Image (tube, rainbow, N blue to C red):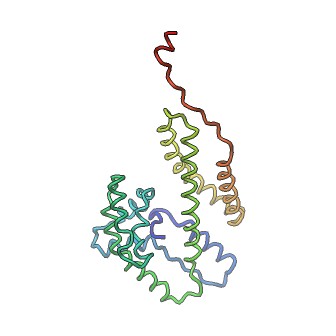
Amino acid sequence: MPWQPLDLPSLRIGLLHALLTRTRPLDEVREFHGSLRWAEFLLERTDGLLRPADHVEMGRESIFDRLGDGVFSGVLYGNPDWGVARPGAHARRREVPVDTAHAMRLHAADFVSRCASEILAEDPDVVGFLPLLAYQLAFGITATVWAISMRTAQQLVAPSQLQGRVAGFTQAAPPATVPAGALTAGALAARLGNVPVLTGGATTALLAAACFWLPLRVSSPRRPESAAARSS
């Protein structure tokens, strides 16, 4: 994936590689890290104007604005002009700079063409891109539904005077637990195997999502008493 963090290995590629090596030890598994290739391609093509720091900002800092998706939208639909106006309208509405996204978009088609040529030049029997793409599609759908449901439940349950604090906590707490969860999952996978850990993670996610169907107790804000009512 083009926006995988540059300072962290891809967990999906690592799991897929380990699983294939274990189940098909006679086959040769080769990895293609599109995120590193994308950062190198931008650095080379723009003579250093688009640096790895710009890649990190687009993939990590702008994730909630979906600017990274817009960079490759023209390639996805086979139309260089498809979706060009949307980032501009979004930037005016949210006051988000999109100059970097526009600059990267100019090189997206050439990058995809080069990647396809390099992969097919090795004459592979199977390309694991489709399972990763299916995962990304499923994650994109479920993550969007999850975020909408979580924000709705948060606004219904949290008192109005605490909405800002609750929103700040929900933004800070989940990313802070990612390293601990990754280390724990890696240790469990080494001891129990990949399949039980992945199955347990999926079950936990489904149970957490089921909490949205639990009844919520919503309290209406108390109205201030009028001066006439206090005097009486």
Vertical relation: 138 (above or below) 168: below
| Residue 60 located left or right of residue 140 | left
Query: Which residue sits furthest top?
Result: 232
Classify residue 19 by image quadrant: bottom right
Vertical relation: 126 (above or below) 18: below
Classify residue 181 by image quadrant: bottom right
Percent position of residue 215, x then y: 68, 42
Percent position of residue 91, x then y: 34, 57
| Residue 205 located left or right of residue 52 | right
Image point (50%, 88%), residue name: 122
Percent position of residue 174, x then y: 54, 49
Percent position of residue 188, x then y: 68, 59
Vertical relation: 210 (above or below) 160: below
Image point (37%, 58%), residue name: 90
Instruction: Give the tally of numbered discs.
Output: 0
Image point (61%, 36%), residue name: 218
| Residue 35 located left or right of residue 134 | left
Classify residue 195 by image quadrant: bottom right
| Residue 10 located left or right of residue 81 | right
Q: Between 95 and 208, which is closer to the camera in this rendering?
A: 95
